[in-house]
Image (spheres, rainbow, N blue to C red):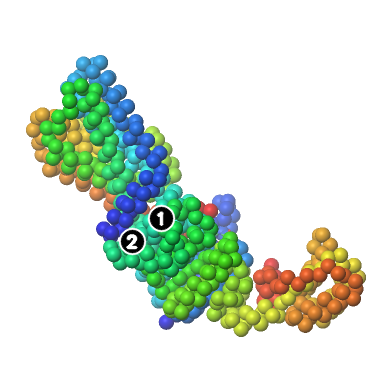
């Protein structure tokens, strides 16, 4: 299983290397960072500078996971590699999760980009990272959580083709709900219980905290929350995947003709 | 133990429109394939060969009936079946074109539980054996059809499964690659693999298979061993002729042993005979009638089917 996982990571790295257009978000990240920094500066919010790193990083991570997850199964079905994978004694969910992990690890390049952009725009040397260990843990768990959540979306798109609309319309509401745009304290309490179920909320909070001078409270618990939400996504994804495969097997749609 | 047993295996697909009746692609198929056998599934396009292969490789569920592979039911124990079945696709399907042969094989080998140096050794061995070693690092989508077919075979062999299913492996292949393929199948049989070979090429089936099951419209018409197939083919022959006067056509039908005379729109005819002797008689008859444009193309699969169906008194659809 772990070997299958590594093989999937390698597979996706190679597939991605051969189709660099899926990494367009890495080009847009510095631009988005610049946009946020300049808007902040114009509004006189120098203190919000951490958000100029956090928001573009998480948005890039999420968009990347979403676009690759959205196409992975459909494409495999078209080129017949889905049939070959289902004929093998291996779990499709594990393979997909592995592939998504490599996508979201590549997505972390966005952090380096955003951090560099903010530093350059600030003109006072590298932007300080007061809590580097928390930051690194947060980045790693966030990319795992993005991969887990993406594993849920892939079969969902196949089971409910209309869910694909989500891919296009739900990104911005999700950034809002994840607290990437404005602090969640601006939301009413009932909405905040919903936002707690989105890993992006926890990731954004913790990443912001790791970039601020104040001590980070409850870091292990907050990391655990990110991991738990990612794991939940993966587990639901496994169930959906089983349904998807069962349905495709019954209806004869493993292969698109 | 039999390698494959199917009992009343049936598969239907939903009709195209919602009100349409389901389309039956496999209809109560009873099949028994012994261990170590090379078994042909012969049938025209749309006969149901691929449907049967997919059920045996667990990517398609039976609608009713059962299929067992070395005793494991495809419906109840699909994972056991997956471990012992290797599928060799034909054509472009089933490979990552943007990866090299070696990268493809390493991925598939990992899905079958290989790892580390054993995985690398197995992949290298397969590349060597299928003659791909020189091009192992080329992107698959730059390779020829014949090269891709070798890779398909290597992929199917990755876990060294006791049952190998080939689905139209030589369709669209050049004659040399097709010949290499036959050598490889002979080789595999020597190693004790059980092989299912789905094809619509009668010569290929005749050359490679111990037994052949004839399928048409989802039904098994007959299962024959090598001698049976030879007799069958020997009992069917065909003569083609052009510019045959109408009364000669009528006369032809009276020649003993002539099964049928088919007339095409362009005025050419096709005479089905029941033996080579009859074929000679027909040729003599036509030459004496002054017909000079003659051809003996040998029987097609359709001709053999026709005779099989006639022999068994089945209705011709
Ligand atoms: N997924 C599917 N959905 C609907 N009809 C199908 C599907 N797959 C095959 N068929 C139909 O079933 C019949 C048998 O197909 P197939 O098994 O591919 O035949 P063969 O491999 O012998 O050419 C064909 O008429 C084909 O159109
Ligand atoms: Mg077919």
Q: Residues within 10 Å of mark 2 (few under 14, many from 20)?
A: many
Residue in the picture at 62% in, 82% down: B228
Please, is residue B183 above or below residue A34 in the view?
below
Chain letter for mark 1: B
Query: Looking at the image, can residue B43 be seen?
Result: no
Which mark is on residue B248?
none
Q: Estimate the spatial distance between the alpha carbons at disc 1 and disc 2, rounded to whole Å.
A: 18 Å
The first of marks 1 and 2 along the sequence is 2
Indicate which label's residue lies in the foreground, 1 or 2. 1
Chain letter for mark 2: B
- Image quadrant of ligand 1 equals bottom right
**In screen coordinates, is B12 left or right of A87?**
right
Mark 2: C-beta under 8 Å from nearest atom of ligand 2: no
Q: Secondary structure at mark 2?
A: helix
Residue in the picture at 24% in, 20% down: A40
**Label 2 sits on residue:** B110
Q: Residues within 10 Å of mark 1 (few under 14, many from 20)?
A: few
Please, is residue B268 above or below residue A102 in the view?
below
Q: Could you tell me residue A183's position as x and y percent?
A: 21, 27
Residue in the picture at 12% in, 35% down: A131
* Front residue of B82 and B93: B93
Please, is residue A11 above or below residue B53 in the view?
above
Q: Considering the image in quadrants, where does the N terminus of chain A appear?
A: bottom left
Query: Looking at the image, can residue A234 be seen?
Result: yes
* Front residue of A187 and A183: A183
Q: Quadrant of residue A195?
A: top left
Which mark is on residue B137?
1
**In screen coordinates, is B313 left or right of A73?**
right
Q: Could you tell me residue A19's position as x and y percent?
A: 41, 43
């Amino acid at each position: 299983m772990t070997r299958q996982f590594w093989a999937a990571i390698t597979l996706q790295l190679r597939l991605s290397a051969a189709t660099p257009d899926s990494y367009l978000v890495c080009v847009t990240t510095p631009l988005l960072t610049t946009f946020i920094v300049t808007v902040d500066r114009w509004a006189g919010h120098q203190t919000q500078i951490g958000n100029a790193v956090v928001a573009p990083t998480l948005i890039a991570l999420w968009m990347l996971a979403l676009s690759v997850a959205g196409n992975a199964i459909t494409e495999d079905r078209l080129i017949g590699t889905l049939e070959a994978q289902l004929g093998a004694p291996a779990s499709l969910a594990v393979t997909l999760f592995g592939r998504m992990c490599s996508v979201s690890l590549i997505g972390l390049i966005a952090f380096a980009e955003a951090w560099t952009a903010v530093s350059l725009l600030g003109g006072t040397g590298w932007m300080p990272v007061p809590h580097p260990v928390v930051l690194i843990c947060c980045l790693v768990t966030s990319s795992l959580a993005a991969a887990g959540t993406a594993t849920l979306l892939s079969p969902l798109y196949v089971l409910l083709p209309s869910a694909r609309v989500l891919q296009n319309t739900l990104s911005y509401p999700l950034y809002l709900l994840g607290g990437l745009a404005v602090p969640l304290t601006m939301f009413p309490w009932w909405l905040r219980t919903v936002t707690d179920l989105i890993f992006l909320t926890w990731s954004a909070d913790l990443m912001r905290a790791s970039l601020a001078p104040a001590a980070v409270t409850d870091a292990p618990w907050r990391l655990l929350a990110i991991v738990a939400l990612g794991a939940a996504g993966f587990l639901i994804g496994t169930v959906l995947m089983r349904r998807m495969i069962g349905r495709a097997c019954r209806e004869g749609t493993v292969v698109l003709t | 133990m039999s390698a494959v047993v199917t009992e009343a295996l049936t598969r239907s697909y939903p009709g195209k429109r919602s009100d349409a009746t389901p389309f039956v692609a496999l209809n109560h198929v009873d099949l028994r394939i012994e261990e170590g056998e090379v078994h042909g599934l012969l049938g025209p396009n749309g006969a149901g060969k691929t449907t049967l292969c997919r059920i045996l490789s667990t990517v398609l569920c039976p609608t009713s009936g059962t299929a067992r592979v070395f005793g494991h039911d495809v419906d109840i124990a699909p994972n056991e079946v997956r471990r012992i079945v290797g599928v060799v696709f034909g054509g472009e399907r089933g490979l990552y074109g943007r990866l090299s042969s070696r990268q493809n094989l390493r991925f598939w080998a990992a899905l079958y539980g290989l790892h580390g140096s054993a995985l690398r050794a197995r992949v290298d061995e397969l590349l060597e054996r299928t003659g791909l070693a020189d091009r192992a690092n080329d992107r698959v989508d730059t390779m020829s059809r014949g090269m891709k077919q070798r890779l398909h075979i290597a992929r199917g062999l990755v876990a060294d499964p006791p049952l190998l299913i080939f689905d139209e492996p030589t369709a669209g292949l050049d004659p040399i690659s097709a010949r290499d393929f036959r050598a490889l199948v002979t080789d595999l049989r020597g190693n004790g693999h059980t092989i299912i070979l789905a094809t619509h090429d009668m010569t290929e089936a005749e050359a490679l298979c111990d037994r052949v099951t004839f399928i048409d419209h989802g039904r098994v018409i007959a299962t024959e061993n090598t001698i049976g197939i030879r007799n069958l083919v020997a009992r069917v022959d065909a003569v083609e002729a052009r510019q045959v006067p109408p009364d000669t056509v009528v006369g032809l039908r009276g020649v003993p042993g002539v099964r049928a005379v088919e007339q095409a729109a362009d005025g050419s005819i096709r005479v089905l005979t029941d033996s080579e002797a009859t074929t000679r008689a027909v040729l003599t008859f036509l030459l004496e009638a002054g017909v000079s444009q003659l051809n003996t193309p040998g029987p097609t699969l359709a001709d053999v089917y026709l005779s099989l169906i006639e022999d068994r008194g089945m209705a011709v659809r």
